[in-house]
Every structure is written in structure tokens, then in C-alpha cells.
């Protein structure tokens, strides 16, 4: 058996063989998986988030999966608050923590030890209610701009992204300062002893996989799953509403997309855009990680062996 690191991370964009590879590594190295996927934490979003199957979870313990109902907020702060003690508990059992997923901010916050900004669920819920009002985004953006006057520009992506805007207002109301003033310079080295591997397929490899997986998901109940989640209020939730693809299915169910072919194309297009952003993130935001470039279709078994050979 290769030398086992104190912690192992298997990261990368969607459809990059992460879940299967992490499972095979955990089985080989007596590990337990901590999911750093921001949406697999929610109950009822199984197909659309490509959640590890029950069979996979029976083979190896998976943490931070199926943890929350749809109406609970979830962010990097709350992930780190749960994942930090989990790491220690897994190691105390003599097992290897295997961090796996595609939400780069969550993995980076945990591994590089970002100072966590304050959070308050009551204040966040109030901000979410204000955001949902007809003029909510404009009023909240105005509040943020007024607070930042003479203190530097407000990041454009914060003003344009409702989730980031709500989080910025939450921090502002708690501290009197916008979040970018409170965050220290980002660390360039992990604060935990960890071996990080980023699986990075080219888009020429990823796109056909995304197309096949999306078609499979639609054929195996994603529309029905989405309909149930939408009926349960998915689009009014603080965080789960961000789950990729459910808004497109909602539009399809309202008759705004002309058939399943149009739905498939819309879902593939959104997922490809997301994968491109993830590729950029993981190439630049995880210094010290070992990048495994994937230029041809491969298998989780081959990727497992590649990583084991590097340990």
C-alpha cells in the first residue's frame, strides 16, 4: 500500500470522475468521504446534483450528503464548521478523510484556513425576504454601495449575483463593513497536511460526458424530482434554489421550453458554462494541488491508479 497522507482531496469540475475516483481511493486506503459539493447536502436533490448513489454510500461512509432539508441555508462558513471536526473524528477512527467535490470555494476555505466571516441565520433570512421583494435587489445594492462610498469599489459580481449580494448585506449588517474589507489576504499554502489532486479534463472530453449524463438524468426521473422540489418551494429557499438545472426544468414545466430536446440543450448549455468556470477556478485557486490533465476519455480505475502512484 502506498504511503497514506493525513488527508486526501480529489477535486475538479463536474463530470470529471471525482465521485467514483474518490470512492475507489477511499476503499483502497480505508477512507471516509467528505463531500464539498454545495448542493449534494440537500435532501431530495438526488438526480440533479449527481449525488453518490445509495450503493456507493453503502460501500464507504459519505459525510455532508443528504444533511439538510431544502429550506436550510448552507455556505462555506457552515461547511467548514461541520467539516473541521469531521476531519478530526475520521482521523481519530484511524481512517483517511477524502475530500471530494466540485465546489472549489468550500474546499479552499477548509484546506487553506480562510478566516470565516460572521453569519447569522436570522439576519440572512431577513435579507432573503427583502431580496425577494420587487425592488429588493436594487435596494440592497444601494445599501451596499452607500456603505462602500469612499471605501473602494463594490465588486461587480457581488452586485449582479443575488446570492453574493445577500451574503454581503448579511456581513455588512453584522459588522458595519462589507466582506471584502474583512477578508485577509488569501493564503497560498494549505493549513492542513493534505495531498490535493485536481482532475482536469479538457472541454473536448467534458462536453460529451455532460451531454450523456444529462440525457441519462432526464431519462431516470430528474423532471419528476424537480417537480417535487419545486412544489416544496425550492425556488424560494435561501441556498438550494441555486442548484444547477432546476430553473430550466421549471421553465419546461411551465411550457416555456418547446419539448425535451430544447430542455436537454438548455441544461447541457448551462452545465458546460459551469464546467468552464470550475476549470478556471481549480487551475488557479488551489496552489500546491497536483493537476491531472485529462485529454482523452478515461476511467475512475485509471485515475485511482494514477493518484496511488503519486502518493
Image: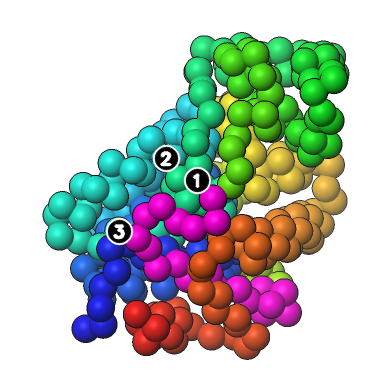
The answer to whether residue 16 is magenta is: no
Q: Earlier in the sequence, mark 2 or mark 3?
A: 2
Identify the magenta region: 187-206
Mark 2 neighbour class, 10 Å CA radius: few under 14, some 14 to 19, many 20 or more = many
* Residues at marks 2 and 3 touching, judged by CB atoms closer than 8 Å: no
Q: Residue at horizontal 55%, vertical 75%? A: 291
Q: Position of residue 74 (x, y in %)?
A: 50, 33
Q: Residue at horizontal 29%, vertical 69%? A: 5
Image-based side of 236 in relation to 79, left or right: right
The answer for how far apart the CA atoms under marks 2 and 1 are is 7 Å
Specify the color scheme: rainbow
Quadrant containing the N terminus in the rendered view: bottom left
Label 3's element? strand
Image-based side of 44 in relation to 58, left or right: right
Q: Quadrant of residue 100?
A: bottom left
* Residues at marks 2 and 1 touching, judged by CB atoms closer than 8 Å: yes
Mark 1 neighbour class, 10 Å CA radius: few under 14, some 14 to 19, many 20 or more = some
Label 2's element? helix
The answer for how far apart the CA atoms under marks 3 and 1 are is 16 Å
Q: Residue at horizontal 34%, vertical 74%? A: 24
Circle 1 sits on which residue?
A: 109
Q: Residue at horizontal 61%, vertical 29%? A: 182
Circle 3 sits on which residue?
A: 97
Is residue 235 something that shows in the picture?
Answer: no
Circle 2 sits on which residue?
A: 80
Quadrant containing the C terminus in the rendered view: bottom left
The answer for how far apart the CA atoms under marks 2 and 3 are is 14 Å
Amino acid at each position: 500500500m502506498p504511503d497514506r497522507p493525513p488527508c486526501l482531496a480529489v477535486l475538479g469540475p463536474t463530470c470529471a470522475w471525482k465521485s467514483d475516483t474518490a470512492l475507489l481511493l477511499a476503499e483502497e486506503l480505508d477512507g471516509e468521504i467528505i463531500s464539498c459539493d454545495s448542493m449534494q447536502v440537500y435532501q431530495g436533490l438526488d438526480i440533479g446534483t449527481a449525488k453518490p448513489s445509495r450503493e456507493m454510500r453503502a460501500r464507504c461512509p459519505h459525510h455532508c450528503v443528504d444533511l439538510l432539508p431544502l429550506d436550510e441555508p448552507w455556505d462555506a462558513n457552515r461547511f467548514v464548521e461541520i467539516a473541521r471536526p469531521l476531519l478530526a473524528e475520521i482521523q481519530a477512527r484511524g481512517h483517511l478523510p477524502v475530500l471530494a467535490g466540485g465546489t472549489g470555494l468550500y474546499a479552499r476555505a477548509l484546506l487553506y484556513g480562510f478566516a470565516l466571516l460572521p453569519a447569522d441565520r436570522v439576519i440572512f433570512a431577513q435579507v432573503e425576504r427583502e431580496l425577494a421583494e420587487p425592488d429588493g435587489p436594487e435596494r440592497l445594492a444601494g445599501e451596499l454601495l452607500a456603505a462602500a462610498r469612499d471605501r473602494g469599489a463594490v465588486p461587480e459580481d457581488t452586485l449582479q449575483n443575488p446570492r453574493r449580494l445577500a451574503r454581503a448585506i448579511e456581513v455588512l449588517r453584522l459588522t458595519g463593513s462589507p466582506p471584502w474589507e474583512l477578508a485577509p489576504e488569501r493564503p497560498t499554502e494549505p493549513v492542513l497536511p493534505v495531498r490535493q489532486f485536481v482532475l482536469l479534463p479538457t472541454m473536448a472530453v467534458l462536453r460529451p460526458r455532460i451531454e450523456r449524463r444529462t440525457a441519462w438524468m432526464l431519462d431516470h426521473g430528474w423532471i419528476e424530482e424537480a417537480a417535487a422540489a419545486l412544489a416544496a418551494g425550492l425556488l424560494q429557499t435561501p441556498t438550494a434554489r441555486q442548484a444547477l438545472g432546476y430553473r430550466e426544468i421549471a421553465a419546461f414545466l411551465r411550457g416555456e421550453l418547446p419539448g425535451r430536446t430544447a430542455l436537454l440543450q438548455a441544461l447541457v448549455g448551462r452545465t458546460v458554462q459551469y464546467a468552464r468556470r470550475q476549470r478556471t477556478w481549480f487551475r488557479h485557486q488551489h496552489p500546491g494541488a497536483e493537476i491531472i490533465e485529462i485529454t482523452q476519455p478515461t476511467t475512475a480505475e485509471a485515475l485511482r491508479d494514477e493518484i496511488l502512484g503519486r502518493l
